Amino acid sequence: MNRLPALLWASLLVLLSACAQQPLRGTGDLGIVIERADGRVAVVDTTARSVLGRIEGLGDLSHASAVFSRDGRYAYIFGRDGGLTKVDILLQRIDKRVMQAGNSIGGAISQDGRLVVAQNYTPGGIKVFDAVTLELLSEVPTQSKVVGLADLPGQRFAYALFDKGEIWVSDLSDPRHPVTQQFPAGVQPYDGLVTPDGRHYMAGLFGEDGIALLDTWKPEAGARKILENYGRGQEKLPVFKMPHLRGWAVAGHQAYLPAIGRHEVLIVDKGTWKETGRIQVKGQPVFVMARPDGRQVWVNFAFPDNGWVQVIDTLKGEVVQTLQPGKAILHMEFTPRGEAVWLSARDDHTVSIYDTQTFARLATLPAKSPSGIFFTSRAARTGF
């Protein structure tokens, strides 16, 4: 009996020590910044505008992307070398890591958060993992590079096959036995996205003008081509960097799309999927991203204009601000409610934070060759 108080004190000291090392906190204002040169991520606080720590050992992050668990605690990072890493952003450590392919460029997480799916260049196809253990549950071979993987409602995933010119939709309701539908899309689909309501999947076409559109509520109708004048057009302009379609902006009843190889942002009516206008911008757009309220669209550019960012006012339909945040602006991410935007400047080794109302620079954080910026607010969004 005399030993009981001593044991209680020991347990209390262990608990207090743990709390001192990692204070209790939520995840809603957290995120990660990919530091591609060092194979690590910085864990950041969007409210404090600070770096909380770094997680090492993530392999080749030269084309890395991330998705989040439903509770925002875990980030699943897809590396270019085929590594899939589950990191605990609260404890700032690797939880699980598997090498699942030879060359991979992204992934997605299921509607219920139980499945993580990787898309692969080499050997192609998609692989389905248990989100808790990273156990491989199944795979869908494609004999083609897979691009544009996006989650859909109902435990489904849509993706495009670059070499085959098709869109596939895999139903993973039974994750060990995928059921896949295949639809002709066009020549060389290079990326894709799903609209915020999860209904329409679009794949940009590099080998021909236009975009393939699939209504996932009516897949039996197949994919159809829209915006046949979208793309490189009659004048074959050099393309310095392909647009990232996951950044397409949907604001109200309109979508804002980067024109391939042109210094333009296209405006498209979501009801008819027809072009309604074009906005001239400084360079070839890469990301065209809407602030959460849809009032602004921020645009960054391919080389040689990749040190600039422009802001479009969607009510006025014109560029209202031009900024030069740093060298090689690779990615932009809005805070959950859009009062600020974070911009990665790879060649300046910094992340800059701007007020979206005043366009004032609020803070600058150090980061080694930063690229992708991903906030936990993505956990609640379809297609992110």
Image: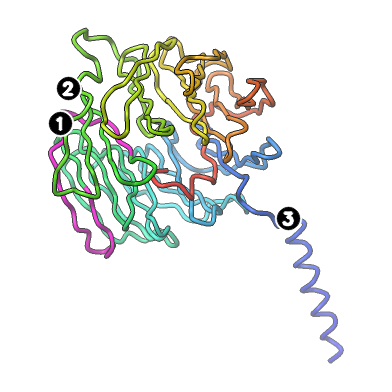
Around disc 2, counting alpha carbons within 10 Å, would you say few (fewer than 14), some (14 to 19), or many (20 or more)?
some
Does the residue at mark 3 contact the one at mark 2 (Cβ under 8 Å)? no
What is the magenta range?
Answer: 169-193
Residue 199 horizontal/vertical position (percent): 30, 46
Q: Secondary structure at mark 3?
A: loop
Residue in the picture at 57% in, 41% down: 336
Work out whether 126 lies above or below 366.
below
Question: Of 232 and 94, which appears nearest the observer?
Answer: 232
Hey, which residue is sitting farthest bottom in the picture?
1
Q: Is 320 positioned to the left or the right of 194 in the image? A: right
The correct choice, above or below, for 274 with respect to 336 in the image is above
Q: Position of residue 18 (x, y in %)?
A: 73, 61
Residue wearing tag 3: 23
Q: Quadrant of the C terminus?
A: top left
Indicate the amino acid at tag 2: Glu
User: Foreground mark, 3 or 2?
Assistant: 2
**Rendering quarter of residue 288:** top left
Q: Are marks 3 and 1 in contact (CB under 8 Å)?
A: no
> Which tag, 1 or 2, sits closer to the chain's start?
1
What residue did someone put label 2 on?
Answer: 208
Residue in the picture at 16% in, 51% down: 181
Occupied quadrant, residue 131: bottom left
Mark 1 vs 2: CB contact within 8 A? yes
User: SS class of the residue under badge 1?
Assistant: loop
Q: Amino acid at mark 3?
A: Pro
| Mark 1 vs mark 2, CA separation in Å | 7 Å
Mark 1 — residue?
186
